[in-house]
Image: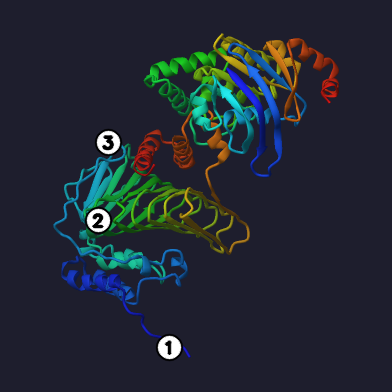
Amino acid sequence: MLEIKNLHARIVDDGTEIIRGLNLTVKAGEVAAIMGPNGSGKSTLSYILAGREDYEVTEGDILYNGQSILEMDPAERATSGIFLAFQYPMEIPGVATMEFLKVAMNEQRKARGEEPLKIPEFLKRVKEAAASLSMDMAMLKRPLNVGFSGGEKKRAEILQMKLLEPKLCVLDETDSGLDIDALKIVSDGVNALRAPDRAFLVITHYQRLLEHIVPDSVHVLYKGQVIKSGDKSLALDLEANGYAGVIGEAA
Amino acid sequence: MNIHTQPQRTPAETALIDAFGDRLSLLPGDGAVMLKRDDAIEAIKHGLPTRRIESWHYTDLRRLLSVVPDFDPTAMAKVFAPIVEGSAVLPVLNGKSDVKVPVLDGVTVQSLSEKLVDGSIAPGLDPYGSDDAIGALNTAFVADGYFVDIADGTELEKPIELQNVQAGGQTHVRLAVRVGAGAKAVIVERQAGDGAALVSSVSQLVLGEGAEVTWLIVQEQPETATHLAQFKAHIGKNAKLTLFVMNAGGKLVRQEVMVKTTGEGADFKLRGINLLAGDTHGDVTMVLDHAVPHTTSTEVIRNVVTGKARGVFQGRINVHQYAQKTNAKMACNTLLLSDDGEFSTKPELEIFADDVVCGHGATVTEIDHDHLFYLMARGVDEKSARGLLVKAFVAEVIEELDDETIVEALEARLDEWFVTHG
């Protein structure tokens, strides 16, 4: 489903190269975990997948279902089924959450050639999804993410993911800022979406999240490259011994 | 050596002076009113204000007012449906009031021409300071409008909508409202039409003790109209005035707001949105006098500028020497969407009292790229995402109004503007 080939990318503003020859393949139905120390390029990778303009791909390619996505803007990527759950979801004053959800869901439907949702059906879906994440509907009456706690913002991200039904879900440190209960709720939300035709790229610092969202593969990112790949036991190994050993091997 | 010469009159100045001569016999008014008119046209004969006049620095009326249309007595203007359903509509069509106005309990309505003929409105025709071009223009030519009196203790359930609808040519209208002690009302001042017009409109409001008024100015002139307007209010003891100004049209627009707190405990809120597109010029100029102790005010202006439009906000707060414990805060935020658009903002605080809290702030920004990315990452295309963010920027001010019906009505006007200019 996702094939990243010899990807090189830099920050547009100052030319700093962050991704330096990254290779990664994720199959449909797979949950791939990306781990790595601070500054290894994990969040950058998530932004590049979503199409953020602050980064420029200088070499290599990203294929999604066999097609390069490099020329697509963030909205086109999103409507083709790529979803990024942000590490720090933005607060957008003045944009009503419900209005935003309706617009976003209907953009997805438009891309699939479907009619816009009728209001009752829309409300039903939002209510169900919110209930499954133990979210209070009153929260959704506020402007988008405004005044939400860190945990509420993460839940709101997963709520959007549920409603938009993407095919490739990129979760950027979704566990950061979550207490144990919230982590469980969010993980259950993600697990409920696991499906043979859907892939996940789960970016995290900690093994903790991977106890709840059990990955099929684990990849260690360091200085903009995948330096080691393995199964879920690799994550346990990293938790026990740190990144030093893996980095030493690669060097 | 300086040689003072009267600069040559512009075609607009000449047209106004000629029009006054032609119209004089048709203008209603007793002796006192006619004297005020003479003074006013004398002021215009000295020339329209230029950028050298401080209060007109960003709106050089002499240069910008290039064409003055003739009066067109045959032009037909039509009443609009009010923005809030069920409002009592008082229309002024092509400068003329309609005597068949609806009657509400506790509300007395007279046509302004009656008040001009009997001279009772004469004191209100005096100019506001020496550079009051809008006041002078209106005083010289005003022929009609309304005088509305809301009796003490009257609480109106539905808004009164004062509609000034032009159909081309010139219209000069005055809307005077007195709100009695303890009365409550929502008043909509609708300024619209479809002609290449010159409109001057002066609104005068007096709030009695403990009165509460929300006054909404909804200006949706076509891009062929010059709209020169003034809103003047006195806020009495413990009275509250919320003035909401929405400028969403016009070629050349200046909305002046002159407000004075005259009784302790008076509170004034100004909320404004200026939507400026194309090759237009929009100016909101406020002069607020905190004239007595213990009065409060807040002013929030949001501007959206696109195309080659130019916008201005001047906000002057005078805190008089005895006006201790004044609390005043002013903010002007602008979203600049094009390279050719511009916005000038000039806050001024003049404080003669020593125990007050006053502050002001101004920002000019572009669309937040992080916000845009977030919305696009959810599949909203760039154009729609920008639209959502721009609307959000101004809708925040509308939503503060706290009255669901009014918020909905104004958001509908906002949507209408975005449909045309999105």
Q: Is residue A179 above or below residue B309?
A: above
Kind of residue at badge 1: Ile
The CA distance from mark 1 to mark 2 is: 44 Å
* Quarter of the image where one finds residue B136: bottom left
Residue at mark 3: chain: B
Nearer the observer: mark 1 or 2; the answer is: 1
Q: Where is mark 2, residue-wise? A: B145
Q: Label 3: few (<14), some or many (≥20) within 10 Å?
A: few
Kind of residue at badge 3: Gly
Residue under the point 46% across and 33% down: B381
Disc nearer the start of the sequence (1/2): 1
Nearer to me, B193 or B339: B339
Residue at mark 1: chain: B
Q: Where is mark 3, residue-wise? A: B86
Disc nearer the start of the sequence (3/2): 3
- Viewed as shown, does residue B62 lie left or right of A204? left
Nearer to me, A162 or B291: A162
Q: Is residue B378 above or below residue B348?
A: above
Image marks 1 and 3: residues in contact by CB distance under 8 Å: no
- Viewed as shown, does residue A60 lie left or right of B59? right
Nearer to me, A146 or B119: A146
**Dot 3: element:** loop
Q: Where is mark 1, residue-wise? A: B3
How far across and how far down the image is residue B320, in percent? 54, 63
